Amino acid sequence: MDIFDAVSSRYSCRAFLNKPVPEQVVRDIVARAARAPSAGNMQPWRVYALAGKRVEDLKALLRPRMASELPKGEGVEYVIYPQPMADPYRARSFTVGELLYQSIGVPREDKPARYKQYARNYEFFGAPVALFFAREKEHGAAQWADIGGYLQTVALLARGHDLHTCPQQAWVSFHKTVRAFLDLPDHLMIYSGMALGYEDPAAPINQWRSPRAPLDDFAVFDDFES
Ligand SMILES: Cc1cc2nc3c(=O)[nH]c(=O)nc-3n(C[C@H](O)[C@H](O)[C@H](O)COP(=O)(O)O)c2cc1C
């Protein structure tokens, strides 16, 4: 797979096959992704990779809590979305929600069905591998951005192994449980989780793709020779 295919075929996969990923493959992805650039080469990312019983144990901890604790969970450790969220960002976010729930036939007003799907986050959408990306609490905006670049590099390398991913900030809503489960040191905090595995190509939730704004809406090109 070349880089163009890796970029265009990456999407947030929300249904995975029950097929294990060898540890060596996950190690390869996590190690290679560290080629991502970072300000001052700080390499501020910290990664926790779980499989097997560890994934099952974490899922089992949260499963009984879903019905009563969603959508708020334990409250977020950091604010994910701007409040209020202005257009065009609000409209884009709204659209992606609509497309997601439409793909599985859940109407906007059916809150219980929406929460049920949202709860699939805490099953890692059936993925056999769970990644958590952590950051130093005292680091700033540049390091947040660097970890984002690392996360995307992981997602693209996963494509090189025929794997798919879904980044999951949903885990931030259960940061206390995740902290205890990972025995996360006080100086770190979770930036995002990520489901990693083989996509279920037949799952309705994997059949749609999120739109993108046209190039001219977000980029300016100045003084190029034609
Ligand atoms: C840092 C980050 C966290 C995300 N968290 C979640 C999540 O918790 N659950 C989820 O279903 N999607 C999550 N997403 C996926 C976004 O909704 C998705 O990237 C966006 O809608 C664009 O769609 P695409 O990834 O399929 O191209 C997250 C994406 C990023 C970058």
Image (cartoon, rainbow, N blue to C red):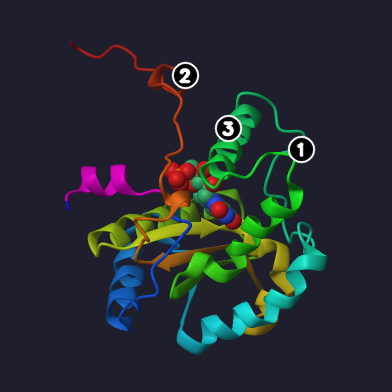
**Mark before the other along the chain sequence, 3 or 2:** 3
The image quadrant where one finds the C terminus is: top left
Residue under circle 3?
A: 95
Residue 186 appearing in the image: no
Magenta stretch: helix, strand or loop mostly = helix
The single residue placed furthest to the right in the displayed view is 68
Label 2 beta carbon less than 8 Å to ligand 1? no
Vertical comparison of 116 with 97: above or below = below
Q: Nearer the viewer, residue 148 or 37?
A: 148
- Relative to 41, 145 lies left or right: right
> Which numbered circle lies on residue 83?
1
How busy is the neighbourhood of tag 1: few (under 14 within 10 Å), some, or many (20 plus)? few
Rounded to the nearest whole Å, what is the CA distance between mark 3 and mark 2? 17 Å
Q: Are marks 3 and 1 in contact (CB under 8 Å)?
A: no
How busy is the neighbourhood of tag 3: few (under 14 within 10 Å), some, or many (20 plus)? few
How busy is the neighbourhood of tag 2: few (under 14 within 10 Å), some, or many (20 plus)? few
- Relative to 215, 168 lies left or right: right
Q: Nearer the viewer, residue 119 or 3?
A: 119
Please report the bounds of the magenta region as a residue range: 2-11
Q: In the image, residue 59 lies at what x, y percent? A: 61, 77
- Relative to 135, 129 lies left or right: left
| Amino acid type of the residue that numbered disc 2 sits on in the rendered structure | Asp
Q: In the image, residue 160 lies at what x, y percent? A: 23, 60
Q: In the image, residue 21 lies at what x, y percent? A: 33, 77
Q: Is 79 a magenta residue?
A: no
| Amino acid type of the residue that numbered disc 3 sits on in the rendered structure | Thr
Pair 3/1: label in front: 3
Residue under circle 2?
A: 217
| Amino acid type of the residue that numbered disc 1 sits on in the rendered structure | Gln
Q: Secondary structure at mark 3?
A: helix
Residue 53 appearing in the image: yes
